[in-house]
Image (cartoon, helix red, strand yellow):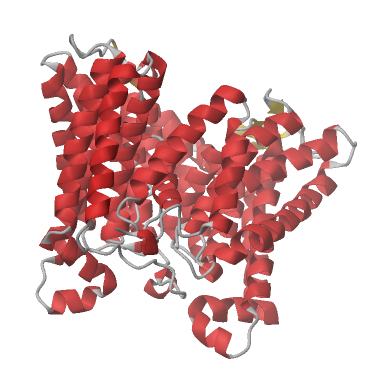
C-alpha cells in the first residue's frame, strides 16, 4: 500500500509541470483557436533561461523561475504579434505551420546558444532533501511540485472569474463574435492570452529543472504529452487540463513499473478511449471546437483541365522519364525520394483539401505501408510486398475511418495523432515482430530494380498510376460528396448523401496511397524503423500540403517537391538546415499564406 501511495505522489509531482504547459496551451486555444505547436519549445526555452540565470549569473532558483516565466511571456507576445497576427482569418492550419517553423528554428538555435550537450538542472535551495512518508522517502521538491499545480489552478480561477480580464477571456472563449461586437479588442486580447499561456509554459520548464536533464529535443517530448492532456481534459478547459494532467502523471508513474513495454501506448489508448466516449474530452464543450473565423480555404475547383495544362503535364512526365536515363545515382536517389514525398502529400491532401478532415497523425498510414511491406518482404516477392503494404495501410485507414467518421476539427486531428503514436509505440516496443529500435534491415529489391535508375523508374510508374487514379477520383461523385459535406454537412445529410461511407472510403484511398509511399521508401532505404510513425513525419506531410496550397489540386505536388528538394539542398550546404528551412517556411506563411499554388492558379 505504501508503494502505491508513493508512486501516485511521484506521478502527481511529474504532472505538475505538465499541467502548467497544458494549461497554457489550452488557454491559447480556447481564446484564439490556435494550436501552438511551438508551445513545447517555449517550455524548453523557459528551462534553459532559468538554468542560464542560475548557473551563469548566480541568480537564486526561486527568483530565476519567475524571471524565466516573464521572459517566455515576452517571447509569446512577440510570436503572436510578429508571426501569428497576419494569419488569423486564413486557413486554420497555417498557424500550425508557422509555429512548426519556429520549432525547426529552435532545433538549431538552442544548441548554438546553449550547446549540444545535455544539461543537468540545479537543485532547489531549501528543498534538496527527502521527507519520510508512509515508511519511504519522498524528495521534498516533489512535495512542493504537488502543491504547485493546485496553487496555479486556483490563481487561474481567480483571474478568470474575479477580474475584468478574466471575464473578457471567458466571453471571447464562449462567444467570440458577440465579444467582438461589444468592442473587445481581439488583437490585444490574443496577445495577452498568448503571453499568459507562454508564461505558464516557461514556468513549467523552469520548475522542471531539478527533475529533468535538459536537451534540445525536450520540446517534442513535452508537446506530445501536452496534446494528450488537453485533448483528454477538453480543448480550452483549464479544469480539464488539471484533471487530465493528474491522470496522465499517475498512469505514467505506474506504467513504468507495471508495464514498461507499454508505457508509450497506454496514454494514447486512454486518449483514444476518452475521445470515442466523449468526442470533446472530459470537460470540453462542442462550442469550444467551432472556429470563429472563416478559416478554411475554399475547396479546390472540380472542373476539367485545360488543353495547355494537359500538354504541360505530359511534357513533365516525359522529362521525368528521360531524367531516369541520364541522372546520376545521387540525383536519381533524391528524385525518387521526391516522388515518394509527392505520394505522401497527395494522400494527405485528399483528406484536408477534398474532405476538410485534419490529420496530425498521417504517418500512421505511411508507417503501416512501410512495415507491412517490410514484414512481407522476407516471405514474398518485393512487388507483392509493396502492394501488400499499400493494402494493409488501406485496411487500417478504413477501420480507423469507421471509428471517426463523424468526427472533425481539432479532436479528429488529435485522434489521428493518438493512432500514429499507438503504432509508433507498437513498432518501438514489439521487438519480436518489428525489431524495436533496431528496425528491420536488408530490404532490397530484386534485379533489375536494385539500381538507382531501376528503382526510380518503378517509383515513377507507380506514382504516376496513383496520381492518375486520384485525378480520376477528383472529378468523380466521390469528390463532390466530400466537397458537399465540407461545405455544409447538415445539408449534405439532409439530401441523403452517403457522407459517412464516403469519408470511410476517403480514409481508405488516402491510406492506400500513403502506404504505397511508405512501402516504396523502405525498399529504397533497405530498412524500416519506428521513426516512420513519428510526429515529425506527420508534420512534414502537413508542411508539404500547406506549402503547396490546400486549395489547388496540384498543391501537394508543388509543396512536396519544393520542401523535399529544399531540405536536401540546404542540408548539403550547412548542418544548421533546420533553422534555414524554418525561416523560409516562416517567410512563406507571411508572404504566400495561400501556398505556392493558389486557387486562382488552378488549371
Q: Position of residue 182 (x, y in %)?
A: 59, 90
Res. 163 visible in picture: no
Q: Give how far across and how far down residue 79 sits, in percent.
A: 66, 56
Residue 141 x/y as whole percent: 70, 40
Q: Quadrant of residue 304?
A: bottom left
Residue at 71%, 45% in the rendered image: 46
Residue found 19% across the figure and 53% down from its top: 506
Residue at image position (11%, 23%) is 384
In this view, 286 is above or below 251: below
Quadrant the C terminus occupies: bottom left
- In the displayed structure, 77 sits above or below 580; it is below
Q: Is residue 299 visible from the viewing direction of this image?
A: yes
Front one among 206 and 322: 322
Does residue 146 lie above or below 518 as drawn?
below
Q: Report whether 162 appears left or right of 391.
A: right
39 or 64: nearer the eye? 39
Q: Position of residue 515 (x, y in %)?
A: 23, 35
Question: Which corner quadrant of the image does residue 258 belong to?
Answer: top left
In this view, the residue farthest toward the bottom is 182
From the viewer's perspective, tell me whether residue 72 is left or right of residue 317.
right
Q: How many marks?
A: 0
Query: Closest to the observer: 35 or 294?
Result: 294
Amino acid at each position: 500500500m505504501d508503494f502505491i501511495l508513493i508512486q501516485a505522489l511521484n506521478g502527481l509531482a511529474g504532472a505538475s509541470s505538465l499541467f502548467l504547459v497544458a494549461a497554457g496551451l489550452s488557454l491559447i486555444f480556447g481564446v484564439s483557436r490556435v494550436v501552438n505547436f511551438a508551445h513545447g519549445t517555449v517550455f524548453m526555452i523557459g528551462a534553459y533561461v532559468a538554468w542560464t540565470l542560475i548557473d551563469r549569473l548566480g541568480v537564486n532558483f526561486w527568483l530565476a523561475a519567475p524571471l524565466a516565466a516573464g521572459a517566455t511571456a515576452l517571447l509569446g507576445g512577440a510570436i503572436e504579434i510578429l508571426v501569428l497576427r497576419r494569419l488569423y482569418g486564413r486557413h486554420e492550419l497555417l498557424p500550425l505551420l508557422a509555429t512548426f517553423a519556429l520549432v525547426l528554428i529552435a532545433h538549431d538555435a538552442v544548441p548554438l546558444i546553449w550547446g549540444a550537450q545535455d544539461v543537468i538542472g540545479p537543485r532547489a535551495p531549501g528543498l534538496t532533501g527527502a521527507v519520510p512518508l508512509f515508511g519511504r522517502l519522498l524528495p521534498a521538491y516533489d512535495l512542493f511540485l504537488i502543491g504547485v499545480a493546485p496553487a496555479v489552478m486556483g490563481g487561474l480561477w481567480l483571474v478568470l472569474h474575479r477580474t475584468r480580464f478574466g471575464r473578457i477571456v471567458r466571453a471571447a472563449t464562449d462567444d467570440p463574435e458577440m465579444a467582438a461586437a461589444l468592442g473587445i479588442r481581439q488583437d490585444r486580447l490574443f496577445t495577452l492570452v498568448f503571453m499568459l499561456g507562454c508564461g505558464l509554459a516557461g514556468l513549467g520548464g523552469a520548475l522542471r529543472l531539478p527533475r529533468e536533464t535538459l536537451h534540445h529535443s525536450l520540446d517534442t517530448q513535452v508537446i506530445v504529452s501536452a496534446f494528450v492532456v488537453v485533448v483528454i481534459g477538453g480543448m480550452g478547459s483549464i479544469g480539464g487540463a488539471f484533471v487530465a494532467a493528474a491522470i496522465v502523471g499517475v498512469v505514467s508513474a505506474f506504467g513504468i513499473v507495471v508495464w514498461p513495454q507499454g508505457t508509450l501506448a497506454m496514454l494514447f489508448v486512454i486518449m483514444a478511449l476518452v475521445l470515442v466516449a466523449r468526442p470533446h474530452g472530459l470537460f470540453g464543450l462542442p462550442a469550444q471546437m467551432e472556429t470563429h473565423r472563416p478559416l478554411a480555404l475554399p475547396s479546390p475547383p472540380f472542373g476539367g483541365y485545360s488543353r495547355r495544362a494537359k500538354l504541360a503535364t505530359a511534357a513533365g512526365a516525359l522529362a521525368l522519364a528521360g531524367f531516369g536515363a541520364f541522372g546520376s545515382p545521387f540525383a536519381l536517389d533524391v528524385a525518387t525520394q521526391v516522388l515518394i514525398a509527392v505520394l505522401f502529400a497527395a494522400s494527405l491532401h485528399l483528406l484536408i483539401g477534398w474532405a476538410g478532415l485534419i490529420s496530425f497523425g498521417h504517418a500512421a498510414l505511411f508507417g503501416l505501408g512501410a512495415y507491412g511491406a517490410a514484414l512481407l518482404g522476407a516471405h514474398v516477392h518485393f512487388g507483392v510486398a509493396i502492394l501488400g503494404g499499400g493494402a494493409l495501410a488501406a485496411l487500417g485507414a478504413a477501420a480507423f475511418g469507421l471509428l471517426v467518421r463523424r468526427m472533425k476539427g481539432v479532436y479528429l486531428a488529435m485522434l489521428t495523432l493518438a493512432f500514429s503514436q499507438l503504432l509508433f509505440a507498437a513498432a518501438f516496443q514489439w521487438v519480436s515482430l518489428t525489431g524495436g529500435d533496431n528496425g528491420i534491415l536488408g530490404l532490397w529489391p530484386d534485379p533489375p530494380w536494385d539500381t538507382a535508375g531501376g528503382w526510380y523508374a518503378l517509383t515513377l510508374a507507380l506514382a504516376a498510376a496513383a496520381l492518375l487514379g486520384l485525378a480520376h477520383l477528383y472529378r468523380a461523385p466521390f469528390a463532390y460528396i466530400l466537397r458537399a459535406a465540407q461545405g455544409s454537412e447538415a445539408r449534405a445529410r439532409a439530401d441523403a448523401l452517403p457522407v459517412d461511407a464516403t469519408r470511410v472510403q476517403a480514409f481508405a484511398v488516402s491510406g492506400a496511397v500513403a502506404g504505397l509511399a511508405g512501402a516504396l521508401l523502405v525498399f529504397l532505404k533497405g530498412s524500416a524503423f519506428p521513426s516512420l510513425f513519428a510526429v515529425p513525419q506527420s508534420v512534414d506531410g502537413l508542411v508539404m500540403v500547406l506549402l503547396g496550397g490546400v486549395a489547388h489540386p496540384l498543391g501537394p505536388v508543388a509543396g512536396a517537391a519544393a520542401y523535399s528538394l529544399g531540405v536536401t539542398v540546404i542540408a548539403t550546404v550547412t548542418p544548421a538546415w533546420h533553422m534555414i528551412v524554418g525561416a523560409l517556411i516562416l517567410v512563406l506563411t507571411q508572404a504566400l499564406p495561400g501556398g505556392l499554388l493558389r486557387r486562382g492558379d488552378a488549371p
